[in-house]
């Protein structure tokens, strides 16, 4: 996003300018709209040693998807780079809920960001069991994200089944009176708006739109899929226009706050998703090749706010939250 000269408007303190980025997600106050996507940030401390990553730039971190028992995940290879993206078939490899509760969550107590636990599983009851085990330790995290959309498990994702989704969200909502309950939707669902309505009716506080898209890659000489599990989830900039349309459609269907997820890698992407209706944006794959991406997005959004104020002849930039869902369709 083109850099702008803040002196042109009556607002020259950079720290004050960053306060323009404050937003919220239900009862969660966010210092910036940026969250970290589940599965791309380990259990919250792995990036402490990565040069350039700055936790101040992030409002919330979603931890690696957790299941009631530890899981090995899918056979290797589990990662493959594609044009402007990547395929992964991790298959919910994770330490299990017990280790998360006893070791990983306590180590995050002084993080400067909200902690979001992400629960998954092969069946609705698997997800409910993981959520139940975590419900006795609610003070260790701000929100629970229900992953009904993992593309790397056997069979059809739970998030394609209206009845199963309603049940899972209703049951978990009852366990969590105070924590924010987020549901992560399936991207390749023609009835995504209808599924969003089901989640709203079942008591969700927010929706993540959406998970990675199912995809595959083939080794032409072997005539076999490259990924050990045959199929994977496509993420990264390649899917951004697809996710943007989903956010737009879900925004029209429900009034729940939306966390945009899918290919966000720069400030322009972030602003597009906010205008389409997202209250927060989640960064995943971009972190793998640019540890500074979150800081850059914050700075770039501030530049946008100043530039837009200047173009509109305003003396002060407007806060980012005033842009949420301001899209007007042509014609
Ligand atoms: C390696 C990898 C592992 C992931 N694991 C999870 C997971 O455990 N739970 C989940 O809800 N989403 C998981 N995701 C999906 C991301 O959270 C995110 O929704 C998706 O990658 C799209 O965003 P991006 O294009 O910014 O990466 C994973 C993605 C990647 C790349």
Image (spheres, helix red, strand yellow):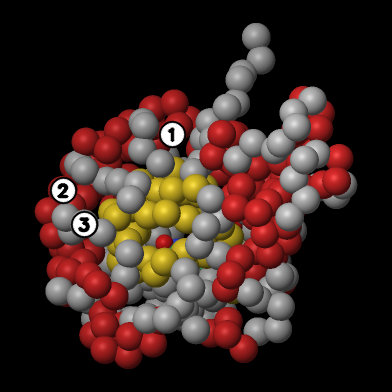
Disc with the residue nearer the chain's start (1 vs 3): 3
**Front residue of 36 and 289:** 36
Q: Is residue 107 visible?
A: yes
What residue is rendered at 60% in x and 41% in y? 320
Label 3 element class:
loop
Between the C-alphas of marks 1 and 3, the distance is 24 Å
Q: Is residue 234 visible?
A: no
Figure quadrant of residue 328:
top right
307 lies above or below 104: above
Return the x and y of residue 270 as percentages of the image width and height.
64, 47
Residue pointed to by mark 3: 178
Crowd around label 2: few <14 · some 14–19 · many ≥20 (10 Å): some
Contact? badges 2 and 1 (CB < 8 Å):
no
What residue is rendered at 73% in x and 55% in y? 13
Return the x and y of residue 264 as percentages of the image width and height.
64, 53
237 relative to 2 in the view: left or right: left
Residue pointed to by mark 1: 250
Return the x and y of residue 10 as percentages of the image width and height.
77, 40
The residue lying furthest to the top in this view is: 331
295 relative to 162 in the view: left or right: right
**Front residue of 120 and 4:** 4
What residue is rendered at 37% in x and 54% in y? 28
3 relative to 250 in the view: left or right: right
Label 2 element class:
helix
Disc with the residue nearer the chain's start (2 vs 3): 2
Label 1 element class:
helix
Q: Nearer the viewer, mark 1 or mark 3?
A: 3
**Front residue of 331 and 141:** 141
Residue pointed to by mark 2: 170
User: Quadrant of the image for the C terminus?
Assistant: top right
């Amino acid at each position: 996003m083109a850099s702008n000269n803040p002196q042109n408007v009556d607002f020259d303190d950079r720290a004050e300018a960053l306060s323009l980025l404050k937003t919220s997600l239900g009862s969660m106050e966010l210092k910036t709209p940026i969250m970290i996507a589940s599965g791309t940030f380990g259990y919250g401390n792995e990036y402490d040693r990565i040069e350039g990553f700055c936790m101040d730039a992030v409002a919330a971190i979603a931890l690696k998807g957790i299941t009631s028992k530890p899981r090995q995940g899918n056979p290797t290879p589990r990662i493959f780079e594609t044009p402007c993206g990547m395929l992964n078939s991790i298959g919910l490899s994770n330490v299990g809920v017990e280790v998360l509760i006893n070791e990983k969550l306590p180590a995050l107590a002084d993080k400067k960001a909200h902690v979001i636990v992400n629960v998954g599983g092969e069946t609705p009851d698997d997800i409910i069991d993981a959520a139940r085990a975590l419900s006795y330790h609610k003070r260790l995290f701000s929100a629970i994200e229900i992953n009904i959309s993992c593309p790397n498990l056997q069979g059809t994702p739970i998030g394609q089944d209206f009845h199963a989704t309603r049940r899972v969200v209703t049951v978990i909502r009852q366990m969590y009176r105070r924590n924010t309950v987020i549901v992560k939707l399936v991207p390749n669902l023609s009835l995504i708006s209808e599924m969003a309505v089901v989640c709203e009716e079942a008591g969700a506080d927010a929706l993540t739109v959406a998970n990675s898209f199912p995809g595959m890659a083939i080794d032409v000489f072997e005539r076999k899929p490259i990924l050990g599990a045959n199929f994977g989830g496509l993420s990264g900039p390649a899917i951004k226009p697809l996710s943007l349309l989903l956010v737009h459609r879900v925004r029209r269907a429900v009034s729940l706050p939306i966390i945009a997820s899918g290919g966000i890698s720069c400030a322009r992407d972030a602003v597009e998703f906010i205008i389409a209706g997202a209250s927060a944006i989640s960064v995943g794959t971009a972190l793998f090749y640019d540890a500074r991406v979150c800081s850059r997005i914050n700075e770039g959004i501030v530049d946008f706010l100043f530039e837009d104020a200047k173009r509109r002849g305003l003396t002060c930039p407007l806060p980012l939250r005033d842009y949420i869902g301001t899209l007007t369709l042509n014609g």
